[in-house]
Amino acid sequence: MSHVMNTYARQPVAFVRGQGCRLYDAEGREYLDALAGIAVNTLGHAHPRLVRALTEQIGRIIHTSNLFESPLQEAAAERLAEITGLEEVFFCNSGLEANECALKLARKYGHERGVEEPAIVVMEKAFHGRSLATLSASGSRKVQAGFEPLVQGFVRVPLNDLEAVRQVAARNRNVVAVFVEPIQGEGGINVARLDYLRGLKEICDANEWLFMSDEVQCGVARTGRWFVYQHAGFTPDVVPIAKGLAGGVPVGACVAGGRAKGLFKPGNHGSTFGGNPLAMTGVITTLDVIRDEGLLENAARVGEAIRAGLAAALAGVPGVVEVRGMGMMIGVELDRPCGDLVGMALQAGLVINVTAERVIRLLPPLVMTEAEGREVVERLVPLVRAFLGAAEPRAAVAR
């Protein structure tokens, strides 16, 4: 019997080795990885530069704590400041912690402006984590159920609805921030329109609210830019980052600037493991490889090829609602629950995921080639057609 707490419905496959975009199970079977550990293995598996850098760092020092200076943390923070356009970086260990930091920044901002009970605008179908504060900010009853009472101070609105946010601004004087995933990952690859993001930023500026862009899943080059807000052409005040930031080493970062700059002082926030030398080596190496190997351009090109390939191959298939996404973050929405496709895909040597019950989620490593992208399409399409019992043509929408 397993002594691991029963918190995951696991697939009956154990991956023991990886190389590039390929995974191998304990029996030696090969799989094409189109999930990247849920947007974590940015550089695929066993990337030689990352392996070498991490191995060398382990031989030097793994942990010292934040009671002492950390040159590697300074170097990693400098790189994040450069690619985000913001100035201050707090390092932690996960996306949840990065989002928790963002929520604390917003409350601190509110209190310093004399708001006794600061409120934060959040979106329906959002997912920000599983701590009590971040699950309260999330728009998922499934995540919240059984953990009430929820943390107060969140005002929920639909995604892509500016009028709803304007109504909140007119009626609620306690609001101090907007907290948005520019592409909702767990929610089903729901893409915020760029004009919507720009409109949100205008509302924030007009009301002196913080604009907080949760880029935990969609950030770090996945969409062809370092961050989704860069497609919209502005800079937020707070950007939580994690998942793919260190190529597989657990790390999170909350980056602040603009109206959020200088809010935290010594004693306001902290983390024992946050910013440890091993994680910082992962961050520095991952960001350098993305730049050196042209992975921003690769994510845009190969992601578009996968999305276009799926849209063309599934056009007119009854039961396919939409193919959507941006770069290497792709969702195929069906008209029915499709969790069974995960096991079917594994049988076919393909690693995918289903989220929001009806959305096939693809988050490939950013090193995936166009040939491997075609292979994803070739392996996935027959499974979807078989699952749906494809018959009469009907138009599928790609965007």
Image (tube, rainbow, N blue to C red):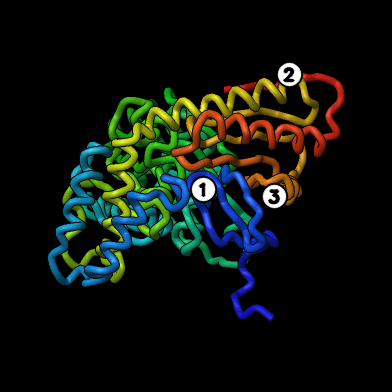
- Looking at the rendered structure, the kind of residue marked 3 is Leu
* Mark 1 secondary-structure assignment: helix
Q: Quadrant of residue 64?
A: bottom left
C-alpha distance separating marks 1 and 2: 30 Å
Q: Is residue 306 left or right of residue 217?
A: right
Of label 1 and label 3, which has the lower sequence position?
Answer: 1
Q: Which residue is mark 1?
A: 36
Q: Which residue is mark 3?
A: 346
**Whole-percent x and y of residue 377?**
65, 31
Residue 163 visible somewhere in the drawing = no
Q: Which residue is mark 2?
A: 395
Of label 1 and label 2, which has the lower sequence position?
Answer: 1
Residue 149 visible somewhere in the drawing = yes
* Quarter of the picture holding the N terminus: bottom right
Tell me which residue sits at (37%, 27%) in the image. Answer: 231
Asked if the residues shown at circle 1 and circle 3 are in contact, with their CB atoms under 8 angstroms apart, the answer is no
Q: Is residue 50 left or right of residue 265?
A: right
Tell which of 17 and 241 is nearer to you.
Answer: 17
**Whole-percent x and y of residue 99?**
39, 54
* Quarter of the picture holding the C terminus: top right
Q: Quadrant of residue 236?
A: top left
Q: Quadrant of residue 208?
A: top left
* Mark 2 secondary-structure assignment: loop
**Whole-percent x and y of residue 179?**
40, 44
Tell which of 303 and 47 is nearer to you.
Answer: 47
- Identify whether 81 is placed above or below 312: below
- Identify whether 339 is placed above or below 391: below
